[in-house]
Amino acid sequence: MNSPGTPAKKSRLALFIIIGLIAGIALGFTLNEKYLVEENSKLAALDASVAQVDAELERATGTAQQVELEARLDTLGEERNAVLAAREKKVEPFSLLADIFLRLIKMIVAPLVFTTLVVGVARLGHIAAVGRIGGRTLLWFVAASLTSLLLGMLLVNIFEPGVAMNLPLPYEAAGSTIVSAGLSLKEFLYHVFPTSVIDAMARNEILQIVVFSLFFGVATAAIGEPGKMVITFMDAVAHVILQMTGYVMYLAPVAVFGAMTAIIAKQGLGILGVYSILIGEFYFGLFILWVLLGLAAYFVVGKRVIELFRHIREPILLAFSTSSSEAAFPKTMEELRRFGCKDKVVSFVLPLGYSFNLDGSMMYMTFASLFIAQSYGMHLPLATQLSMLLVLMITSKGIAGVPRASLVVIAGTLATFDIPEAGLALLLGIDPLLDMGRSATNVVGNSVATVVVSKWEESTDARPAQMSKA
């Protein structure tokens, strides 16, 4: 009998999500053509009027004329907001389906980050005992994480996939401002260090939760034997919360249906062209990341990198088809041992990699966060984007490689930078397609990390290499 976490269950969930996606597109198209024609026509006319007044304002020379044109813009803006509100009211039942799902996702952000990060840091507390293996593993993880995040940030700024969405800001976010480089050192430090972890969890302040978790994890490792009970308890709680995440994900097909219905009803089928562009650009980015990881492995293990990819092709396919890098974990461990890595290296590096080295997921987080900002016409300065990158760098270390767990980190990051969290609904429909690629990439990244660290430690068995040369 299949458990809720088996690949068969996950495959059925992916199928239901695709069904919800298709049904939402079909219903949304019908509503766009039949139910929201009046509102969409008014919006198109108002947008044309706004563009015309803007052009006149640029050419205006007299103060009186400028004041008159600005007043007209204010009036048109009020009319546009009224039409948007009326349109939103009509599709509200469908939007609520996605909103409830997003609230449930946000519900588990704080406890999931806290428990998984405490367990990961407490186990990393054994670095002093394992010496060079721990240090070199951490060095590789940091380098690979930064490479993934920077590559994602670079590509999303080059391609700008969200610009074509041209969505209005949600009402509650209409007056918000993006945290910029102008943030003072005092404000930044106050934002990072919590006065109360309970308050930080209540407000989903991810950075503050991370800081507390780091202290808690290090202290847990430092007290020795009693700390093992804490680690065991936290690990159990983390698995309970991950199980809750699985339950919440069962609602994903309904949320996808509601989100796609609302989006297509308001924007029309033309919006799908933007999604196809986003998917293509994201997979192109993953391809580049695979090439970079392969080159890094080549400089360490030489031509055996080809043999490595032959060994892990089955785990890659398993992760891709189930949208879960965890589903491929046992097979990956087995194949890495067959490749020639020693058990002590595989046992140490690979499990840590599933919490600390999710290369595909981190690239997706950068893509998704900046895509949502671009969709709402928000320009983020380079300094702000780098700050976001560092936040993702830290918070992603506390999330296990389970299907769509990246949404949890993205939700917290959007809140940190005042980007409308409702933008997550833009990604729900295509997230399964993106999840397949990033899960497979996570397997590649962790496999390369294990082999590289193994070679650095001169722990790779020479026999497979000799056999391959024979």
Image (cartoon, rainbow, N blue to C red):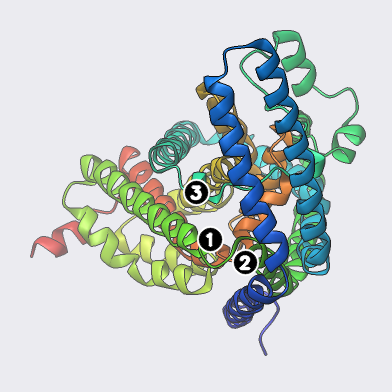
Whichever of labels 1 and 3 marks the residue nearer the N terminus, that label is 3
Q: Picture coordinates of residue 111 (x, y %)?
A: 81, 48
Mark 1–mark 2 Cα distance, whole angstroms, equals: 7 Å
In terms of depth relative to the viewer, which is nearer, 374 or 44? Answer: 44
In terms of depth relative to the viewer, which is nearer, 104 or 369? Answer: 369
Q: Picture coordinates of residue 334 (x, y %)?
A: 42, 67
Mark 1–mark 3 Cα distance, whole angstroms, equals: 8 Å
Q: Amino acid at mark 3?
A: Ala
> Within 10 angstroms of label 1, few (less than 14), some, or many (20 or more) residues?
some
Is label 2 in a helix, a strand or a loop? helix
Is label 3 in a helix, a strand or a loop? helix
Label 1: which residue? 271
Q: Amino acid at mark 2?
A: Ile
Q: Are marks 1 and 2 in contact (CB under 8 Å)?
A: yes
Label 3: which residue? 164
In terms of depth relative to the viewer, which is nearer, 149 or 359? Answer: 149
Q: Is residue 410 left or right of residue 345?
A: right
Mark 2–mark 3 Cα distance, whole angstroms, equals: 14 Å
